[in-house]
Image (cartoon, rainbow, N blue to C red):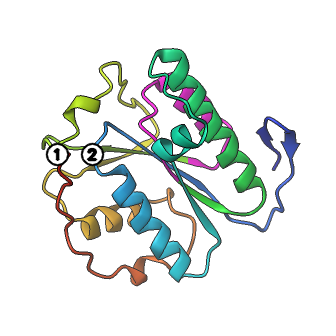
Amino acid sequence: MPIECACGPVDQPENLRTMIYWFTGQPGSGKTTLALALKAVLQKAGHPVVHLDGEFLRGLMANRDFSEAGRTRNVKAGQQLAAKLHAEGIVVVASFVSPYRDLREEFKAKGNVVEIYVHTTELRGREAHFAADFEPPQKDFLDIDTTRASVEACLQQILQAKPVFPVRGVAELVEPIPRLKPKSL
């Protein structure tokens, strides 16, 4: 199945079962924590996997623009990189605030993208970074509330979602993960 990226369509072998797991939500909701936990489980199962983080990419590109245009540029760069890695046969686990629903929907429409909406009612020291214009997903997403759930429980919810998680043989690899304490700023 061809995948669109900035370099043009890229063919992916039919027998390759890779996905892009796009974690989205407000800062401090647990996106990166869950993304890294999923990456570890996939690696343990022998899958080639890369984690992309919105904050890291923003720093790499020296993008300090938090306007709609700046945020859009950061999300699109992440999506292009994810599409290219996916086309190369790599499972991509991405954690981006990605506040704009239309960008996420457009990306999901290209195929093999699972949107995982991570949210919490807890204040975890990141409230100064909230995206006031964040648009929660409305369709075709996995809802993960991290308010009272452990990392392990959230990870099990992701791994057990059908047909969201096509990679076989990983759910039994989840080991208890200690609940992380929020970082203070």
Magenta part of the chain: 94-113
Residue 29: image tag: 2
Q: In the rendered structure, does residue 81 fall within the stretch colored magenta?
A: no
Pick whichever, 153 or 184, lies toward us: 184
At x 31%, y 39%, the residue is 27
At x 49%, y 42%, the residue is 54
Pick whichever, 37 or 163, lies toward us: 37
At x 20%, y 45%, the residue is 185
Compared to 161, does 63 lie above or below? above
Left or right of 84? Residue 182 is left
Secondary element under disc 1, as helix, strand or loop, is: loop
Q: Position of residue 67 (x, y in %)?
A: 46, 16
Determine crowd level at label 1: few under 14, some 14-19, many 20+ residues with C-alpha closer than 10 A: some
Compared to 46, does 103 lie above or below? above
Determine crowd level at label 2: few under 14, some 14-19, many 20+ residues with C-alpha closer than 10 A: many
> What is the total number of numbered labels drawn onto the structure image?
2
Residue 124: image tag: 1
Compared to 52, does 62 lie above or below? above
Of mark 1 and mark 2, the one earlier in the sequence is: 2
Give, as a three-letter code, the residue at label 1.
Arg
Quadrant position of residue 130: top left
Task: Tell me whether the residue at label 1 lies in contact with that at label 2, contact meaning CB atoms closer than 8 angstroms.
Answer: yes
Residue 121 at least partly seen = yes
Which of pointers 1 and 2 indicates the residue nearer the eye?
1
Q: Where is residue 25 in the image (x, y as percent from the top left)?
A: 35, 38
Left or right of 17? Residue 177 is left
Secondary element under disc 2, as helix, strand or loop, is: loop
Left or right of 39? Residue 1 is right
